[in-house]
Image: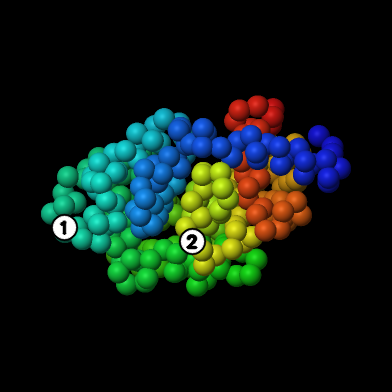
Amino acid sequence: MKLKKSEMKEFLDERVKLYNQPSFIGLDPISIPHRFTSKEDIEIAGFLAATIAWGNRVAILKSAEKMLAFMGVSPYDFVVNHRDNDLKGINGCIHRTFNAEDFIYFIEALKYIYLEKGGMEAIFSQHCTDSSLQPAIHEFRSIFFELPHNARTERHVSDPFKGSAAKKINMFLRWMVRRDDRGVDFGIWRSIPPSVLSCPLDVHSGNVARRLGLLTRKQNDAKAVAELDTALRKFDKDDPVKYDFALFGLGVFENFSR
């Protein structure tokens, strides 16, 4: 599909308006943190929901419900105040390859981050650059796995410095950082500008971006994320990842990538 830059921007802006709506929250993983009002509860529920956000969307929500059930009505209170005995009921599969051992480690690592490192926002804010949050993702991951853990758990937090598109954590960061008046993204991390966010690149958004000529790289990896960042920031340098709504909506709801 060949459009002039102005035509492309108009086309994408229209799709952003269409899909950046609360009516699309229901079956999206972002519906999980939307159940909470306190900053820390939103962060933890959002991070856990984003971590398991692959596969069937209904299954993702059911698995997230399972994690919330273990933690009660306040994820933050459970994370920072739990004792070893409180973790004994966590067993079996949580979501696909994310199992009880992984979930328990995530709880312990989050406790460490909140009590010893000032919280998630502090880490990302400290390590982001003027143009990117990808270095901050790398540093966050390093800190997250400072406690003793099974190496297989590391697969659940991607590292862009190892070539990953880090789709799930970029999606989580969009939820926390991006802000507008639509009621979808939270925008509760005021220390980080939305201009440094990267698009959560997956099969749908990648294929749509290629069809539109916004992306030439065939793999959905860190280099593709950087290429897409460059393209989207030409349309809106202050809020480039609003176009995630357009790319995802075009792919999932309009079969535009086929």
Question: Is residue 28 found left or right of 103 in the rendered image?
Answer: right
Q: Residue 252 or 9: which is nearer the viewer? A: 9
Q: Quadrant of residue 70?
A: top left
Res 227 quadrant in image: bottom right
Q: Amino acid at mark 2?
A: Trp
In the visual, does 130 lie left or right of 188? right
Up/down of 206 relative to 43, above or below: above
Q: Can I make out residue 81 in this image?
A: yes
Instruction: Look at the image and tell me whether residue 170 can be seen.
Output: no
| Residue 38 screen position, x and y as percent | 35, 55
Q: Return the mark for residue 15.
A: none
Q: Position of residue 93 (x, y in %)?
A: 29, 39
Element type at marker 1?
helix
Q: Residue at x 32, y 38 (%)?
A: 65
Say which amino acid is labelled 1.
Asp
Q: Earlier in the sequence, mark 1 or mark 2?
A: 1
Residue placed most toward the observer, 162 or 235:
235
- Judging depth in this view, the residue of 152 and 68 nearest the camera is 68
Residue holding disc 1: 84
Label 2: few (<14), some (14–19) or many (≥20) C-alpha neighbours in 10 Å: many
Residue extending farthest to the left is 85
* Placement of 35 over or under 135, stated as above or below: above
Residue occupying the point 25% across, 41% down:
69
> In the rendered image of this protein, does residue 106 appear above or below residue 2?
below
- Give the secondary structure at mark 2: loop
Assign the C terminus to one quadrant of the image: top right
Q: Which residue is under mark 2?
A: 189
